[in-house]
Image: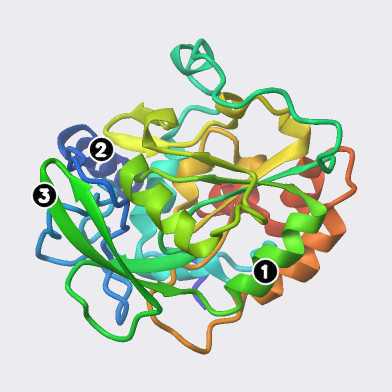
Amino acid sequence: MHSSYPTTPQKTQRLKVAVDLSQTQQPQASPICSKIRSPKKGKATKTKPTDIFSPGPWRKKKSFGSISKPKRPLGDPLGVLYALLEEDAEVLYCMIDLPKRVPTRFLKRQPILKSKKSSMPKNTLVLDLDETLVHCNTEGIGEYDERFSVRYNSHDYDVYMKKRPHLENFLATVSKWFEVVVFTASQKCYANTLLDVIDQDRKYIHHRVFRESCAHYKDNFLKPLEILNRSLSNCFLIDNSPQTFGFQIDNGIPITSWFDNDQDNELQQLIAILKEMKDLADVRPFIRKTFGVQEFLDHIW
């Protein structure tokens, strides 16, 4: 493990490239927010996806020279940040460049959810959808659990969906401990249909929030949680793209992007961690200590 870090000119150039990418890449109009990464190598693909997919515009093949790992573990129990540092470091450097507070224009928006019912649990668990809970494609590549149709922009698409391992048990368990919200950067027409397949009777997922509620910041869809009308001390997000909670680092838990690995058990691992969080008066100190995202970013900087 190397202990040397990039020099100041290298850092400056790296951030310049990251900012240029965020300013020039435009998100595609599509109902599915797929992260467009190769399931084999974890790198951005060379070809653009079909029009039904929406790429993460922060991801682009680019070399930043030699990048060393932090010298010591900094939380990261699922190993997400270490993996990103090796395979997709641009995500981390874009997070470093984000403002530490949510821009005012996003705080003026009308909240999307009504006040929480008194019958709901104290804390709110917000879940990303694509590559966090499921993986979908329109080509029918590989095995799939469900197939359904979506109409978008006057076109009909067949969508092939595969569930992340342990998904049913995960949702059944956490729905007893938390108010559960799915917050996706995908379009409502696709995500609603998919969630009807995953949770047909709406037993586990209490609210659904879609792309129009994201914060469109420098051509990315981020997810400041104020739009949900929940206290930040009692609300947190699990997302395979950690920059989505980059405005509110201590309200986010990173999870590895999932495509087709049948041996994956991260949802199962998270259950034990979430059990400790269900009754916390403030989830942020626990997340900061357990996952160490801000400390990790500070250390690589």
Q: Amino acid at mark 3?
A: His
Neighbor class of circle 2 (other Cα within 10 Å; few <14, some 14-19, many 20+) is some
Q: Which residue is mark 2?
A: 22
**Could you say where residue 187 lies in the image, as x and y percent from the top left?**
32, 42
Q: Which mark is residue 110?
A: none
Q: Which residue is mark 3?
A: 155
Residue 232 visible, this angle: yes
Q: Which mark is residue 170?
A: 1
Residue 81 visible, this angle: no
- Indicate the secondary structure of the residue bearing disc 2: helix
Left/right of residue 23 with respect to residue 204 in the rendered view: left
What is the CA distance from the residue labelled 2 to the residue labelled 1? 34 Å
Residue with the most extreme front position: 201
Left/right of residue 109 with respect to residue 274 in the rendered view: left
**Could you say where residue 256 lies in the image, as x and y percent from the top left?**
50, 68
Residue at image position (30%, 82%) is 40
